[in-house]
Every structure is written in C-alpha cells, then in structure tokens.
Amino acid sequence: SKRAGHQTLVVPPRQPDGDGPPAIEARGLTKRFGDFCAVDHVSFTIKRGEIFGFLGSNGCGKTTTMKMLTGLLAASEGEAALFGQPVNANDLATRKRVGFMSQAFSLYSELTVRQNLLLHAQLFHLPAERIPARIAEL
C-alpha cells in the first residue's frame, strides 16, 4: 500500500557527457611518509555530473587522497587534475578553486602555522590587505 501523497521519483541514468575533460582525474597518485606508503598508485576518473562514492576502512588513505586531489598535500608520485587543470599543492590558486570539507575540523600538519592561518583567512574571505596584519597579531 502507498502512503497518502507519496509520489515515485524516477531518476534516469546519467547520459554520457562528451564535452570537456573529466571533473576529477587521478593518475597513479601515491603518497609516502618516509618508508610508509599511505596511498599506492591510485587511479580513477569521475565524469562531470557523475556521483562517486569513495569508501574504505579507517586508515586506508581516503583523506590523504582527497588532500592530494584538492592541493592540500603534494603527491609523492602521480598526477591529479580538476576539470582538466593540474592540481599543484604549491599553488594557492588551486585551493581557491576547490572546496573540501573534512570529517572534522583540523589544522593541516603538512602546512606551516602561517600557511594554515593564511588558508583559513582566505576561506573566511578576510580582505587580502588585512591578512598579513591579522596573521602577525595571532
């Protein structure tokens, strides 16, 4: 029996989008911390409009991979691209183009204190001319 007012929602399959590069592309992404390999040659492509689930157990490298894809962490090997543009962990322009929400708020250990403050000042849209003084104050 159907509930009163219930309507079925039909979601048609996504049609292939041949226009433009993939939304996200990882090619051989690898991250080593000393002798420990946290991510080992991960490759995948996510097309525009595609819904993608990134699943795995705790400690398997999901967050590390996401940080490499968003430019928050440099890869030891491999490449990442967002909409055809290479991701460069040393380029703040990459971070300005990308939004990333981690499971819990944290500071990024791969960034210096100053870089963390700069990143968060920009995330909170602090006017550029006020950022150096605010960082110095903190």
Image (cartoon, helix red, strand yellow):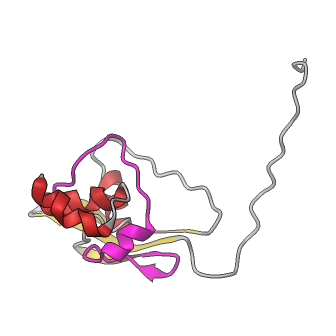
Report if residue 98 lies within the magenta region: yes
Left/right of residue 101 with respect to residue 75 in the rendered view: right
Quadrant of res 52: bottom right
Location of residue 119 (image quadrant)? bottom left
* Residue 111 seen in this snapshot: no
Task: Provide the major secondary structure of the magenta segment.
Answer: loop
At a point 90% along the width and 24% down the height, the residue shown is: 5
Residue occupying image coordinates x 30% and y 68%: 128
Q: Is residue 57 left or right of residue 53?
A: left
Frontmost residue, 57 versus 20: 20
Q: Residue at x 33, y 52 (%)?
A: 63
Q: Tell me residue 10's x, y (percent).
A: 84, 45
Q: Quadrant of the N terminus?
A: top right
Q: Is residue 49 left or right of residue 15?
A: left
Count of labels shown? 0
Report if residue 108 is visible in the image. yes
Residue 111 occupies quadrant: bottom left
Name the spot of residue 2 as percent of width and height, x first: 89, 21
Q: What residue span does the magenta drawing correspond to?
A: 80-109
Say whether residue 90 is magenta. yes
List x then y, in percent, for residue 118: 23, 62
Q: Along the horizontal axis of the image, is 46 left or right of 124?
A: right
In the image, is residue 56 above or below residue 98?
Answer: above
> What x and y, as percent, mark residue 81?
44, 76
4, above or below 49, in the image: above
Q: Residue at x 46, y 52 (%)?
A: 54
